[in-house]
């Protein structure tokens, strides 16, 4: 029941960014399974398994001076997440665990498409 509800929320309130269907599909396929894009995360906070996507993006914007650097980081981190590279505080890792590498699951090219989509 609860899983169905969560799924409905995820599907109905994905990021309302300019339409790039392919990029949105890639994002939903590879990222939002963990990083939810719903804005109503507060009520679901006990069920989330990773920081919500907007939280990740906020953190990224605070940490990188320009979008190119941020996009590069996003691609690199997705392929090769390490504690040393983390921009979230260590507590994030202790709470959620380190992000699993997406190497072999999503190509560098697709990650670049996702990064561009998130930064548009
Ligand atoms: C299996 C779950 C999972 C998937 C799938 C996933 N992530 Fe993550 N991600 C996490 C968790 C957990 C964290 C928090 C711990 C950390 O930073 O490694 C995280 C953190 C991040 C961070 C911040 C890293 C930092 O410096 O602290 C970025 C950026 C990120 N994810 C991007 C992505 C992108 C882009 C995708 C899709 C291509 C994706 N993630 C897919 C679980 C996931």
Image: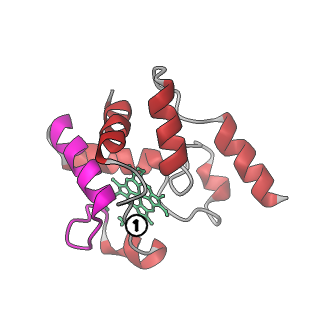
- Decide if residue 29 is on the left or right side of residue 90: right
Residue under the point 40% across and 66% down: 99
The answer to whether residue 28 is magenta is no
**Ligand 1 closer than 8 Å to the CB at disc 1?**
yes
Pick the residue in front: 38 or 101: 101
Badge 1: how crowded within 10 Å, few (<14), some, or many (20+)?
Answer: some
Residue segment shown in magenta: 67-88
Pick the residue in front: 17 or 40: 17
The answer to whether residue 74 is magenta is yes
Farthest residue, direction front: 104
Q: Is residue 56 above or below residue 66?
A: below
User: Residue tagged by mark 1?
Assistant: 99
- Decide if residue 56 is on the left or right side of residue 62: right
Residue 78 location (% of width, % of height): 33, 56
Residue under the point 63% across and 35% down: 13
Tell which quarter ligand 1 is in: bottom left
């Amino acid at each position: 029941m609860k899983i169905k509800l969560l799924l409905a929320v995820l599907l109905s309130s994905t990021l309302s960014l300019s339409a790039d269907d392919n990029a949105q599909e890639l994002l939903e396929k590879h990222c939002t399974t963990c990083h939810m894009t719903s804005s109503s995360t507060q009520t679901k906070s006990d069920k989330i398994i990773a920081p919500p996507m907007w939280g990740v993006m906020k953190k990224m914007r605070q940490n990188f001076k320009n979008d190119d650097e941020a996009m590069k980081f996003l691609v690199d981190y997705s392929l090769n997440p390490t504690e040393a590279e983390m921009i979230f505080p260590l507590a994030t890792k202790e709470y959620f665990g380190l992000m699993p590498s997406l190497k072999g699951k999503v190509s560098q090219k697709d990650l670049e498409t996702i990064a561009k989509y998130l930064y548009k």
